[in-house]
């Protein structure tokens, strides 16, 4: 069912009488996204690693493995502590996507290794490897490192950098140099490879917030896809040539499932945001998900005939400051925030569309967060809805008393 007035009445009927604000997952849409994401790799044979940062709910992570079956293998975590938390909850095969050098994290990596858990920790410099080496050597274990390659697009070998600022390793020479240095370090071994093409996977190319730029973004993406495929293959070949052996070669994200999966050298792709489909992920041409994660606020004021005010709602997403990082009122459709207030911590005024169904004080309005897992930092639990009723409640990381960043 599309996001129309009927959908609004559907959710309203299910949630009437509950305490607001609340967050919920439409399991029918969530499961459809699991199936769709799995379908993108049917012909490629690649497995899909679940990006836990975009879910932040153990029950829903486990549901993906249950519903999706063999198409899904492993988790991409965002901190070492989170990796330990995932393992404590019965999960394994964790790729930690962001580096750390603090002693407590090295101790945790050693503990997981001694427990024979499969954990790969991200590195992009010899200094990070030396910290891991010392920890592994002192504990008489060999820690597994994942080399992170910068997949940004630099057209014509210029200083232009299209992508995120992550790893300093951009080409074959950079990668081989680090690999050779790593071989002289005891207690650590590079056994995994990752390259995240943010300018494809995380950049909408059909955004209503930047219509004039959409054709430019699509052009850059097309050029970047070809560049990445060649460069990733060259770097992997060179690294294998100097003696590295990889358990996994990871790439991409929800927005680049098709293009990354098509690369022969990649053994797995990552997906996270596509399961919830927050509003920023509704603006891609090549992938299409169903909105599955929402939060609801109660209407508590009516300043004018055409404006209602909700209690709370200021759940603004991280990243560069821009209008598209605000939560989006989606049900009833056609609502929009005031430019002078936006979504506020204690109140969010909304302008009503002409064809809006009757809304009275106490009625809900439903929003989507701009990003996926960040919504879970605001709520202790997610209500689970399916086929017209609440079928369960799932604790978020926050609800389990955990906050990792």
Image: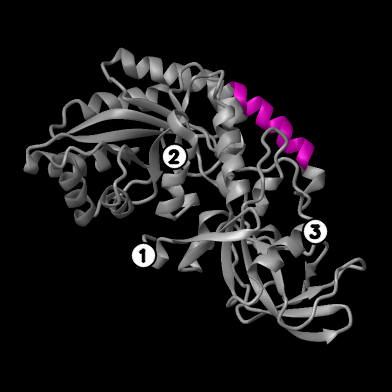
Horizontal and vertical percent position of residue 130: 20, 40
> Which of marks 1 and 3 precedes in the sequence?
3
Q: Are marks 1 and 2 in contact (CB under 8 Å)?
A: no
**Residue 255 point in image, percent of width and height:** 61, 38
- Which residue is rendered at x = 83% and y = 62% of the image? 334
Tell whether label 2 touches label 3 (CB within 8 Å). Answer: no
Which SS class for mark 1? helix
360 horizontally vs 237: left or right? right
- Give the spatial CA distance, label 1 vs label 2: 22 Å
Q: In the rendered view, would you say 249 is above or below 297?
A: above
**Is label 2 in a helix, a strand or a loop?**
helix
| Residue 66 disc label | 2
Does label 1 or label 2 sit earlier along the sequence? 2
Residue 155 or 89: which is nearer the viewer? 89
| Residues at marks 3 and 2, CA–CA distance in whole angstroms | 31 Å
- Asked if 248 appears above or below 253 in the picture, the reply is above
Across the whole image, how many numbered discs are drawn on residues? Answer: 3
Q: Residue at x 28, y 26 (%)?
A: 179
Q: Is residue 170 visible?
A: no
* Left/right of residue 85 with respect to residue 293 in the rendered view: left
Q: Main secondary structure of the magenta part?
A: helix
Answer few, some or many: residues within 10 Å of disc 3's Cα (few below 14, many 20 plus, some between 14 and 19): some
Screen quadrant of the C terminus: bottom left
Q: Tell me whether the residue at label 3 lies in contact with that at label 1, contact meaning CB atoms closer than 8 angstroms.
A: no
Find residue 400 and name its label.
1
Question: Is 230 one of the magenta-colored residues?
Answer: no
Residue 395: name its quadrant: bottom left
Query: Disc number at residue 6?
Result: 3
Q: Residues within 10 Å of mark 2 (few under 14, many from 20)?
A: few
Q: Which residues are magenta?
A: 214-226
């Amino acid at each position: 069912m599309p996001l129309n007035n009927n959908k609004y009445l559907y959710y309203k009927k299910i949630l009437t009488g509950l305490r607001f604000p609340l967050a919920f997952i439409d399991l029918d849409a969530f499961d459809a996204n699991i199936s769709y994401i799995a379908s993108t790799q049917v012909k490629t044979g690649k497995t899909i690693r679940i990006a836990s940062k975009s879910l932040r709910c153990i029950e829903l992570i486990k549901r993906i493995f249950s519903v999706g079956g063999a198409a899904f293998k492993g988790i991409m975590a965002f901190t070492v502590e989170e990796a330990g938390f995932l393992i404590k909850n019965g999960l394994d095969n964790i790729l930690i996507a962001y580096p750390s050098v603090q002693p407590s994290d090295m101790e945790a990596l050693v503990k997981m290794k001694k427990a024979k858990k499969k954990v790969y920790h991200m590195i992009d410099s010899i200094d990070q490897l030396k910290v891991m080496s010392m920890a592994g050597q002192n504990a008489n274990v060999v820690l597994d490192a994942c080399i992170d390659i910068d997949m940004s697009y630099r057209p014509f070998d210029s200083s232009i950098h299209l992508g995120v600022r992550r790893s300093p390793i951009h080409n074959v020479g950079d990668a081989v140099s680090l690999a050779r240095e790593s071989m002289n370090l005891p207690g650590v071994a590079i056994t995994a490879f990752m390259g995240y093409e943010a300018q494809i996977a995380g950049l909408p190319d059909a955004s209503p917030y930047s219509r004039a730029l959409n054709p430019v973004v699509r052009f850059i993406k097309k050029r970047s896809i070809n560049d990445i495929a060649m460069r990733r293959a060259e770097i992997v070949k060179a690294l294998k040539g100097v003696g590295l052996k990889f358990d996994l070669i990871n790439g991409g994200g929800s927005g680049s499932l098709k293009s990354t999966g098509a690369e022969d050298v990649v053994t797995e792709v990552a997906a996270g945001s596509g399961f919830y489909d927050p509003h920023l992920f509704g603006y891609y041409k090549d992938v299409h998900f169903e909105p599955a994660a929402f939060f609801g606020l109660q209407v508590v004021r009516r300043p004018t005939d055409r404006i209602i005010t909700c209690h709370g709602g200021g759940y603004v997403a991280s990243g560069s400051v821009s209008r598209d990082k605000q939560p989006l009122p989606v049900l009833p459709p056609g609502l929009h925030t005031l430019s002078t207030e936006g979504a506020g911590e204690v109140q969010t005024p909304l302008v009503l569309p002409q064809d809006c169904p009757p809304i009275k004080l106490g009625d809900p309005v439903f929003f989507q967060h701009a990003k996926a897992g960040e919504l879970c930092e605001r709520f202790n639990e997610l209500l689970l809805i399916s086929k017209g009723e609440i079928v369960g409640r799932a604790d978020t990381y926050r609800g389990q008393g955990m906050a990792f960043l």
